Image (cartoon, grey):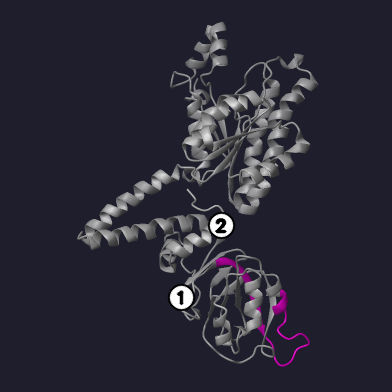
Amino acid sequence: MMEWKNDSELFEIIEKELYTPVVGDILDELGYYHRFLPMEVQPMKEHMVLVGRAMPVVMSDIHGPQEKPFGLLTESLDQLEPGEIYVASGGSQRCAYWGGEILTATAKSRGARGAVVNGPHRDTPQVLEQDWPVYSIGRYAQDSSVRTAVIDFRCPLEIEGVWIEPGDLIFGDLDGVLVVPRDIEKTVITKALDKARGEKLVRMEIENGMSSTDAFKKIRHSIRRSIMSKAFRLDNKIALITGGASGLGLAMAKSMVEAGAKVIITSIAQNEIDDALVELGPAGSGYLSDVTDLEAIADFIEKVEKEVGPIDIFVSNAGNHLKKDAVQTTDVEYMNVLNVHLLGGFAMTREVSKNMLTRKSGSIIFITSMAAIFGINGTVAYTSAKSALKGMTRELATELSPHGIRVNAIAPGFIESRLLRQAFNNDPQREQKVLGRTPMNHLGVPEDIGNVAVFLSSEAAGYITGVELPVDGGTSIGF
């Protein structure tokens, strides 16, 4: 479970609860052994804590007056964005890399959260007067205008073996400055919070008279149990489920609400939405939406995110069916099925994933079918659509997963429902055929699909992407 929704919340949590040694310990645990900047880089004052996104700046030595003193210094300052930290290195450190009221005032006015320079600073009283975090290797008054210039910025930067990419997380306190690669920051900070909170509990137990050995054993067990419990939760998540007002869509919505998520359901029938929201309670919200209205989808996603919040989980569940022999299926009937499952599913996914890419986080789930695994007579349009979704799952996983977005599919087996029961009553041999190839010898229930959707959306499935998971009691492997 992630405890923050944006950078502002993340930075606040780090400032309040963490310290660089515990974050460094987690980086070591994960195999990132060299993430601290040189020990000489220290805060100008002890109380200065630094948390933000890296805006790397490359400096180089120059010799004597230049046509453009300081190089690209002013351009780099003007490009700072809110939440960023000016991180500069390069050159021989023979002059001040930061100083003066103007540099500090400019960066501060742009919403930057501090500066880290692998070199000296100057104009100490004027910088301290602005009470803005600056880290450097010490004080030195020598001017940089004829000695060092900025030659590039917002580009990869190396400081004594530590590589810094634009957007990496920078965290500094009295013990040093470390760099957390953005693609692992969620794991690192979550584990660091568990460790820091656990250490506080150990200290409290020791202060209450428990031996250190017993305190560590007690808290270690408690932390492991807490981590496992949180891994399957969806607290603070927002899920969008198309076709979520009935059937398996509603089952997934109910399971996600029980796991702590806010759930947005869509349907083409207002009465179904109204009935579903009664079951979902205050954590549910509903919208009329037709996934085949492709031109309206971008505006719809924008509206939903503006009214409810950023979508963390998207389940492409809206669908229709056609039971008809292939030679009797018209082109229009065939396309009607593909329009809902495939074109509508893709268009919704495309618009949702644009914002997920910006946030570098998200989970997308497609609902496929047994029809995408083995042949079922009379379902050529449905089988085509579901088989295409299976392929789309794999392609999107390779494209989006490097950016923190997992893409998976659920292939429901034969799930108990009013319509399925009616079909079996009309054709008892069909029920026996289904159960005869299902090793578990019974039908599934909607909650089975809901629980798997929660799992695939949760941190517990954080290393799972590109899979189609059959939830079928073994039907797909039975004989």
Residue ID for mark 2: 183
**Mark 1 element type:** loop
Q: In this orientation, does residue 83 appear?
A: yes
Q: In this orientation, does residue 369 appear?
A: no
> Residue 157 at what x, y percent from top left?
61, 72
Q: Amino acid at mark 2?
A: Asp
Q: Is residue 423 magenta?
A: no
Q: Residue at x 75, y 17 (%)?
A: 329
| In this rendering, position of residue 228 left or right of residue 125 | left
> Residue 296 at what x, y percent from top left?
76, 37
> Residue 207 at what x, y percent from top left?
24, 63
| In the rendered image, the vertical position of residue 343 relative to residue 247, given as above or below | below
Q: Amino acid at mark 1?
A: His
Q: How many marks?
A: 2
Point out the tag, 2 or 1, that comes first from the N-terminus: 1
Q: Which mark is residue 377?
A: none
| In this rendering, position of residue 316 left or right of residue 432 | right
Q: Which residues are magenta?
A: 52-75
Q: Are marks 2 and 1 in contact (CB under 8 Å)?
A: no
Residue 327 lies in quadrant: top right
Residue ID for mark 1: 47
> Residue 261 at what x, y percent from top left?
52, 40
